[in-house]
Image (tube, coloured by chain):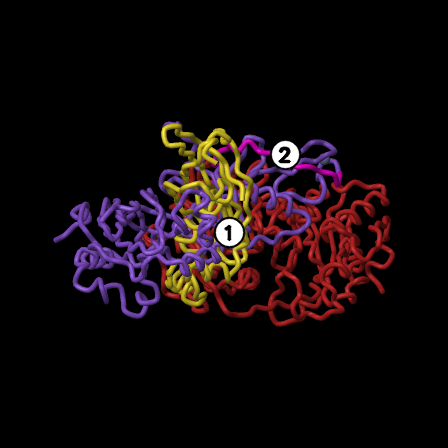
Amino acid sequence: MNGRTYEEVATGEELPPLPIPLTRTLIVATAIASRDYQDVHHDPGLAVERGSTDIFMNILTTNGLVDRYVTEWAGPAAVVTAIRIRLGVPNYPGDTMTLTGTVTAKHDEDRRVEIAVRGENGLGAHVTGTVAVRLPAKDAT
Amino acid sequence: MTSYEDFAGREILPLWEGPDPVNVPMIRHWAEAMGDRNPIYRDDAAARATGRPGIVAPASMMQAWTMRGYAATVEGPDAGARAGAAAGARELDGLLEKDGYTSVVATDSEFEFHRELVAGDRVSVREVVESISPEKSTALGTGRFVTTVRTYTDQDGEVVAVQRWRLLRFRPKEARAPRPRPAVNRDNAFWFEAAREHRLVIQRCAGCGTLRHPPGPCCPHCGSFDWDAAEASGRGQVYSFVVNHHPRHPAFEYPLIVAVVELDEGTRLVTNLVGVEPGEVEIGMPVVLDWLDADPDLSLPVFRPQSGIAA
Amino acid sequence: MSGFSGAAAIAGIGATEFSKDSGRSELRLACEAVLAAVADAGLKPSDVDGMVTFTADTNAEIHVARSTGMRDLTFFSRIPHGGGAACGTVQQAALAVATGVADVVVCYRAFNERSGVRYGLGQADGPAETGADSAAYAWLTPFGLSTPAQWVAMFARRYMHEYGATSEDFGRVAVVDRRHAATNPAAWFYRRPITLEDHQASRWIAEPLHLLDCCQETDGGQALVVVSAERARDLPHPPAVVLGAAQGSGDDQHMMTSYYRPRITGIPEMGLVGRQLYAQSGLGPADMDAAILYDHFTPLVLPQLEELGFCAPGEAKDFVAEGNLELGGRLPFNTHGGQLGEAYLHGMNGIAEAVRLVRGTSVNQPEGVRNVIVTAGTGVPTSGLVLGADR
Ligand SMILES: [Zn+2]
């Protein structure tokens, strides 16, 4: 598995988009894997009763998917130092969320790179945020 | 009487240790569900190749180590290890409940990670209120943003991560019925399709250039069946208006302002006025286009008073 | 056949291609066929003043007229019962032409019966209605403009703005109606008159309309029998002779929402009806001894007085305030209480009251009534009558 070194990355670089089909199974499986048993993430009847149109993805999963998106691009040597997200419209089953990202800053002192991330579904922006990763130096690999 | 302001700095969750130590099976389940194929979460050798001591947990999994899981739903929020320790939380919940903020949704999570977790780590969390916003009107309903700081520590009391965590505690909006559906057919579909892209268009005769709205299949002036659509400037003025009170349709909030707006291009259309009180509307008032995304299939042009115009 | 035999002829024909999937709206097909027929006759759309179609047709006359550039219509009629209507449309047109109520009548029928609603599949689970009448509502109901009171209020607001009329000017119409209903035992609001203060204090329905600007809603029925004047003379009651009977649909006519005309303070289709009534009867506004004017909502009574020549545009508010509509006034109005006071029966009860006025049997009978003008609905293609005592 190849990774990126700090030197290879330039501010303004765009990450390849990642479409994620939002199946009902994904929403339930990720909620359970994050130990979130709230009914709005697995019980359609109760979700509707609480004013939602269907079950929807939990925020821990959004964190997990944003984490995966950036580290898939950065490679296994990257160390995640920050994930800051804001949620917009919900991720409902049947939709697709497409993640996109752009390198917005580089910090030479600790080889830290900041990536602005955005996840859009059919309703609009589900997530906007920033992920910071520390990348290996060129000669360290 | 406690007020929301008094909660800044108060602890609502005393230090509490998660039920399981960091462990490889739970990491693997997480990575599998997330579709995360990073080898450092499942392969000791691959993790060591990156300079790590062995398999690590995904950074984003931090909060999951301190989730009460299914137990929370069967024992209630204050049972078990938290019993008797979460007085601040109960007091805050009581205050929020009294104001009708019965619903909750997470809106922000800002994690700073101090180190990666490895198998055997024991994660504890403590939560302190940072601020509670004044009442805000949101798309979901009226409520307050409760911002807390959750500090995650390890078995040695060292901080492993800090999370700023924001929940909206709110009164759900009265469920609104969808707006009445327009009958879309071959003569008007272009207009509603443009509206979905937030473009206000006016049908234009390809024969003589006359603009017409509402649109129709042929030109009353020259008889041409050919037409295209011109983009409207989005500026106009109120030609007449109505303030609806009765009967009430469940899709709308009342009083409801419906206006005939005359566009700068000369055609008129029926629309709603927003950002203005019924008593402030006047015939001749300059207005500008705005968009209402009534629901995923239907966007409608609405108008608001042109800013910078003295009343 | 007698009477109009030989008085009318078919002068033009036109059609679209015939296919299994036209790819166009039914309204467009109607427009194409109508324009072709008019051209074949060597005429212009603006020469057409009459239209006949099937009740089953989705293309209302006003949509076809507006789209093809027709202007004033003095005759429009529909025949029921599906395909049985076909020759009937020509009979209607011939009657209209023979009697002079129209000069050029177009008969039409257009549909996507194969690619759209297939009669052969039965009525269950049909696709959503997307004909021209339904599509017309697409410009209104998504914005919450969906009731007659709301549609009328839009005209009323503009009328107030241009002519300086007030809510009280509308209220005076309601007060007269309710005063007349108060002495009519058949009226819903018998013995329940209102004051202008009551009107002003009544709750908003659709500003600028108060509750008391709006007619009631009624269950009921009303029928009329029409025979020849000659025969009527042998029957028990004094005849109410039809001195004039006219229809009108105006330029750029919509259904209750003709907001796109250069000005919206008048009711052009009512002016068209009035001019025909006076021409047919040889009478004028000064000859009318009473008026039964359509009053589902008070504001549109004012422009009716203007369109029918009882006062100049913008002056109806003064005409009403001066007491002209009272029993002892210049033009006793809605002596039964109107639709605001007696009953809302789509204007048919007003025709009956006009008959009683001519007979001299109204519960609020003014002195010396010979000629009465009656109008039908406002905001829509409309009609009117002048009924008179036997001469
Ligand atoms: Zn043209």
Above or below, comparing residue C18 to residue C262 in the picture? below
Q: Position of residue C7 (x, y in %)?
A: 84, 54
Residue C136 position within the rendered picture, expressed as x and y whole percent measured from the top left: 61, 50
How many labels sit on residues? Answer: 2
Query: Where residue C351 sits in the image (x, y, percent)?
Result: 57, 61
Q: Chain C shown in which color?
A: red
- Seen in the picture, residue C333 relative to B265 is either above or below; the reply is below
Task: Judge from the rendering whether residue B207 lies leftward or rightward of residue C262; answer left or right.
Answer: right
In depth, the one of C6 and A129 nearer the eye is A129
**What's drawn in magenta, residue-wise?**
B224-240
Residue at image location 30% in from the left, 46% down from the top: B161
Residue B141's tag is none
Residue position marked by numbered label 1 in the rendering: B37
Image point 53% across, 41% down: which residue?
A2
Residue B102: name its quadrant. bottom left
Q: Is residue C312 magenta?
A: no
Shade representing chain B = purple
Residue A75 or residue A26, whichever sits in front: A75
Q: Comparing marks 1 and 2, which lies closer to the viewer?
A: 1
Marks 1 and 2 share the same chain: yes
Would residue A59 appear left or right of C255 to someone viewing this image?
left
Q: Quadrant of ligand 1?
A: top right
Q: Dot 2 surroundings within 10 Å: few (below 14), some, or many (20 or more)? A: some
> Which chain shows up in yellow?
A
